[in-house]
Image: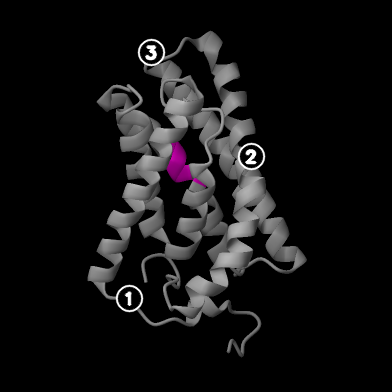
Amino acid sequence: MNTDPQVPEYSRRSSKPVVFSILLFIVLVCIDALAAKFAVFSFGIAPGVSSIYVVVAVMIVFTLWFGMWGAFAAYAGCYIGAGMLGGIPAGINLVWSLADSWQVIIPLLAFRTLKVDASPTDVKDILALLIFGVLLNNLAGAFWGSTTLALGGVISWSGVIPVFYGWLSGNVISCLVLVPALLYFVTPVIRDHDLIIRKYWQ
């Protein structure tokens, strides 16, 4: 039982073995990459970009549960599933795939700094989720992703605005629908099995 209402229960967990974290990272990369590939190939609007990028919601939830392991898995999954398989040149892909990193690191930093519970129940939790886990993070990702594609010559500068809005709208809808539900219903199960990373790495 969490006896301190100011400290989310996940911050009280014991450190995880390194082997567990590495295996977890590999599993998360596989899930992220496969889901990213499916989204880009099924609903693509530009190289590596999907109008319905449902995997972003999964990446955010994984990162809130598993800290920086989830964030690095989001980058690797994007690099492989959306970038490499989506036809983005390797050099550009290295930078472009950071878009998915911003989309998961921003809510992670906010949740840990503000001590927001990973199973949002009160007004503070919900506001933090909406601001940092739906709006600001996806604005950053859409801006980074669309502009780096243009800088790399993958799309024209006239295509930046359509790609930006397609990216942003699809991500926001996916996050609004899936992230709150996954956090609310699944976080208690993850927590009960002592799988949540306390802070960033452990």
Q: CA distance from mark 2 to mark 1?
A: 32 Å
Name the image quarter holding residue 67.
Answer: bottom left
Q: Is residue 107 magenta?
A: no
Name the image quarter holding residue 201.
Answer: bottom left
Q: Secondary structure at mark 1?
A: loop
Residue at the extreme left of the image, as rendered:
19
Q: What is the three-letter code of the residue carrying label 2?
A: Val
> Which mark sits nearer the N-terminus, 2 or 3?
3
Label 3 packing within 10 angstroms: few (<14), some (14-19), many (20+)? few
Q: CA distance from mark 2 to mark 3?
A: 26 Å
Q: Relative to the observer, which residue lies in front, 126 or 184?
A: 184
Q: Which residue is mark 2?
A: 172
Q: Which mark is residue 56?
A: none
Q: Which residue is mark 1?
A: 16
Q: Which stretch did the figure color magenta?
A: 99-103
Classify 51 as above or below 70: above
- Residue drawn at x 59%, y 17% is 162
In this rendering, position of residue 76 left or right of residue 167: left
Q: Which residue is mark 3?
A: 153
- From the top left corner, tell me how far across and down residue 34 is, in percent: 36, 41
Q: Secondary structure at mark 3?
A: loop
> Which mark sits nearer the N-terminus, 3 or 1?
1
- Residue drawn at x 59%, y 62% is 183
Label 2 packing within 10 angstroms: few (<14), some (14-19), many (20+)? many
- From the top left corner, tell me how far across and down residue 39 is, in percent: 47, 33
Q: Relative to the observer, which residue lies in front, 104 or 37?
A: 37
Q: Secondary structure at mark 2?
A: helix
- From the top left corner, tell me how far across and down residue 82 is, in percent: 38, 32
Classify 145 as above or below 64: above
Q: Nearer the viewer, mark 3 or mark 1?
A: 1
Q: CA distance from mark 3 to mark 1?
A: 43 Å
Q: What is the three-letter code of the residue carrying label 1?
A: Lys
